[in-house]
Image (cartoon, rainbow, N blue to C red):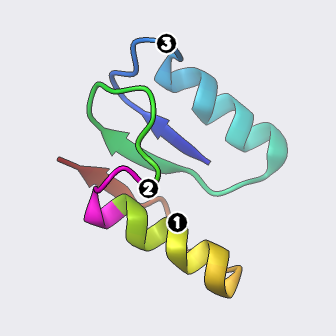
């Protein structure tokens, strides 16, 4: 699950709560756009690719920014 701190469409806390409900790991992106996965941010894209290829997350609560 990826949630963006300044997302204009979906509040950050909604992503936090959904990740908790799904027992999913949360990637926090510090920015203000709605969609960040596979949009050219190396940090986020690396985590997404790692999950899609290896079906594993990095562990912890990764944070990415611009």
Taking the spot 50% from the left edge, 37% from the top edge, the residue there is 3
Left or right, residue 59 beside residue 40:
right
The residue at 82%/45% (across/down) is 22
Q: Which residue is mark 2?
A: 38
Q: Is residue 66 left or right of residue 20?
A: left
Q: Main secondary structure of the magenta part?
A: loop
Residue 58 visible in image: no
Q: Residue furthest left?
A: 66
> Label 1 near label 2: C-beta < 8 Å?
yes
Residue 48 image label: 1
Residue 45 percent coordinates (x, y): 40, 64
Give yes or no for residue 2 being in the magenta stretch. Answer: no
The 10 Å Cα crowd at callout 1, few under 14, some 14 to 19, many 20 or more, is many
Which residue is at a point 43% across and 26% down the rendered structure image?
Answer: 34
Question: Residue 20: horizontal and vertical position, in percent?
Answer: 73, 41
Q: Which region shows up in magenta?
A: 38-43
Q: Secondary structure at mark 2?
A: loop
Q: Residue at x 48, y 25 (%)?
A: 12
């Amino acid at each position: 699950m990826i949630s963006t701190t300044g997302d204009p469409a979906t509040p950050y806390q909604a992503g936090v709560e959904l990740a908790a409900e799904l027992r999913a790991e949360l990637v926090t992106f510090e920015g203000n756009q709605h969609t960040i996965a596979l949009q050219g941010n190396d940090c986020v894209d690396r985590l997404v690719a790692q999950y899609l290829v290896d079906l594993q997350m990095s562990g912890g609560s990764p944070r990415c920014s611009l």
